[in-house]
Amino acid sequence: MSKSGIKDVAERAGVAVGTVSRVLNGHPSVTAEVRARVKAVIQELGYRPDPFARSMRSKISRLIGIVIPNLTNPFFAELVQYAERAATDHGHNVIFMTSFDDSAKEADRLAQLAGRKVDGIIIVPSDGPHPIKAPTGLPLITVDRLIADHPGVAADHRGGARLAVDYLAGLGHRRIACIAGPAGSRPAEDRLQGYLDVMKTLRNDSEPLFVHAAFDFESGRAAGTHLLARPRDERPTALFASSDQQAIGCLRAARDLGIQVPAELSVVGFDGIPLSNLIAPRLTTVVQPMREIADAAISSLLGRRTMPPVGTPDLFQCELAVRESSAAPFSEPAAVSSV
Amino acid sequence: MSKSGIKDVAERAGVAVGTVSRVLNGHPSVTAEVRARVKAVIQELGYRPDPFARSMRSKISRLIGIVIPNLTNPFFAELVQYAERAATDHGHNVIFMTSFDDSAKEADRLAQLAGRKVDGIIIVPSDGPHPIKAPTGLPLITVDRLIADHPGVAADHRGGARLAVDYLAGLGHRRIACIAGPAGSRPAEDRLQGYLDVMKTLRNDSEPLFVHAAFDFESGRAAGTHLLARPRDERPTALFASSDQQAIGCLRAARDLGIQVPAELSVVGFDGIPLSNLIAPRLTTVVQPMREIADAAISSLLGRRTMPPVGTPDLFQCELAVRESSAAPFSEPAAVSSV
DNA sequence: AATACGCGATGAAACGTTTCCAAGTCTAAA
DNA sequence: TTTAGACTTGGAAACGTTTCATCGCGTATT
C-alpha cells in the first residue's frame, strides 16, 4: 500500500509499463481483458500516478488558475466557489491567487501560473488603466470585467441595469439617481449606460443624475449621502446603485439622514450577493447568474464549449429580484416616523 | 526568450548543469564568481525552472492546500485571503478546495491534495461527527475548528465569549441569552462555555438561557425569534450570538418583532467579519485576529515557527469591538417607537 | 496459399530537474 | 616538499511518467 509506481503495476499485471500508461489514459488500443487485469492491479495496489511525472512529460497539469482582485467582495467569493466546483467536476484543481487590484501583482501572478503550466486561467482583471495582460499562449478567460481582445464571460450588465431602472420608472419614479461604479471599469460603464438608456426614454419628465464611486460599501455610503443631502422636493425618490455593497452603503446613508426606505426612497442594487437578502430591509437587486457564469468560464477554458469569437463576449441575462427596499413613490411619508 | 532549459543556461555559462542547479537552490558550495555568471545568464535567457521536473525529483512542490467548508461564510473568505497572502510571501502557491461541510467530499479533497504532493494542508474541518482525517504523513494543520490529535491554530473562543458576556453583564444586563453554535462543533462548544463561565458568576441574579443553531443567518434568525417571542418582562435584554451571521439574523428577528436595538435589546456577535461593521446598527462583536491566525498557520506548516506540542493548540486572543448594537438595559423604551 | 494490413503490446527514449559520487584544485599542516 | 583535507565542479544516474518506433500475430484480400 505504500508508494507503488507504474512499474510495480506493470510487473504485477504481467504487462509493459507503456500498456499500463495507456489504460491509465483511456487509450483505445488495449484489449478489454488486459485493461481489466491492469485496473484490478491498480485497485489492489492503491496505485496513484504521480502528477508531477505525468505533467512533466505530457504538458498537461489538470490545474487551472484563478486570479481575482480580492476575496472580501462576496461577489468574487461566490465566483471562486462556483468555479472551483466546476473545475473539480471536470477533474481539475484550482490554484487561487489574489491581485489586490494591483496590476504589477497581477502580472506577477500570471507569470507564476504560466510557470506552473496550468491548463488555463480565469481572471477578473484588476481595475484601473488596464495594460494588456501578457500570459503568453495559454488559454485565458476574463470574467466580469471584460477586456478588449480577450475572450470573456460576464453578465449582461447593461441589460441588467435597464431591468432595474425600467422597474423603478414603471413604479412611477421620475427622479431616479444612479451611483455609477468607478470610471474606467467596464462593468461600471455598462451599468451606467443601461441607466442612461432608460433615462433617455423618460427625458421629458426627468434627467439623469449620477456620480461615480468605487464598488465598496463606504464609497456607496459617501455617494449616497452626497445625492440625498438636499431638500426633500429635489431629492431623488429612487436610487440605482451599481453594486449591492454600494446599495447597502446607501441604505446606511439614508438611515443616517432620517430617510425612510422604501417609503421615501427606493433603493436597487446590483449583483445579488447572498447578503442582499439578509439585511433589513431586504434589498431589491439585479442578480447575476454566477453559477452559470462560472460554469461557462470553466467549460470554455477546458474546450468543452464553443466560445463566441473573440470580441463578442458571452453575456448572461440577469434577473431582477424585487424585495423590500423598493416601492412606488409617495408624496407623503408612509407613517409617523420615530426620531 | 522562448523555452530554455537548465542545459541551455549551463552551456551558455560554460558550466555543468549540476552547477546551475546548485546556484538555483542557493547551495553554499559555489564560487561567488561562478554564481554571478550563472545568475547573469539566467537573467539574460529569462530562464524559469520547470516546477514539475523540479518537484518530481525533489519531492517538494511549493504548493499548499487549503480546504474549507465553503466560501460563502465571509469568515472563511477572510481566512483564505490571508492564508494565500502569507503563502505567497513564503514563495508558495495555494490549491483551494471546498468541502461543502461534507466529510466524504472532505476526505476526497484531502486525498487529491496528498496526490498532488502538496507541502502542507490547512483545513477547516467539516462540522458534524468528525471521523479522524487520514492524510497520511504530510503536515496538516487545522484552523478554527480544532480536532483532537491534530495541531491547530484558532482564536481563543472561550475567552472571546467571556469578553462579550462580561461586557454585557458590566452594562447591567442580567437576562442574557445565548445562541450557541451547532452542538458538536468545537468552537461552538467553547463559545458556549465562555458564556456559561460568566453566567455562573451571576447566578444569584440570572440563569443561563441558550439554544443551539447553525452558524448561518437563517438559523440565527429562527433562534432569535424563538428566544425573543415572549412577554417583555421575561424576554432577554441581551443576546450573545456565536457568529456574526447569527447575530445579524437576530437583528432581523428583533426588527420583525418590533423590538428596538439597542434600546430594548443588546446584541453581540462573534467573528468580526467586515460586514458586521456595515449593517445598521453596526454590530458589537468579538473580533478574531484572522490575519495572525492565518499567518501562524502558514508559518507552522512551513516550519518557520515552532508549534506548541500537539494537544496544546495555539490560541489567539480576541478583541471586543463595541459598536451600536449594544447598550445598557432600559426598563422603559428609549422613545416612542413607530409601528 | 501468399501477401498485406491492422491491432495490441513491448521496450526504450525522452521530459527537465536534483543529487550523488568522483575528480580536480588549492590551502594548510607536517 | 609532500600530503592530508576542504572546497568546487563535472558527469551521470535517477525521478515516474508518456510517447514513439517496432514487432508479432491473426485476419482479410488477392
Image: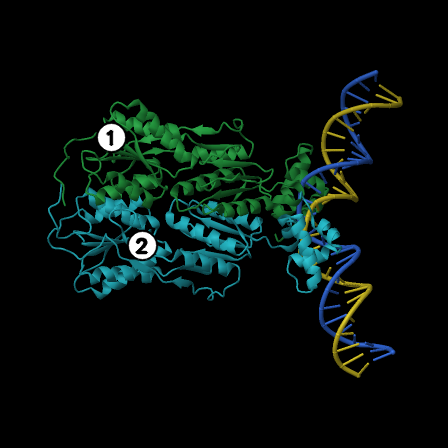
Chain colours: A green, B cyan, C yellow, D blue
Mark-to-mark CA distance, 2 and 1: 41 Å
Query: Label 1: few (<14), some or many (≥20) within 10 Å?
Result: many
Front-most of residues B7 and D27: B7
Left or right: B51 with respect to B164?
A: right
Residue B134 seen anywhere in this rendered image of the structure? no
User: Which quadrant: the C terminus of chain A?
Assistant: top left
Tell me the element at label 1: loop
Whole-percent x, y for residue B154 in the image: 40, 59
Front-most of residues B280 and A183: A183
Q: Which residue, given by chain and number where applicable, does mark 1 sit on?
A: A175
Q: Which chain hosts label 1?
A: A
Q: Which residue, given by chain and number where applicable, does mark 2 sit on?
A: B270
Residue A334 seen anywhere in this rendered image of the structure? yes
Whole-percent x, y for residue A308 in the image: 52, 26
Left or right: B121 with respect to A40?
A: left
Whole-percent x, y for residue B164 in the image: 27, 59
Q: Residue at x 31, y 45 (%)?
A: B217
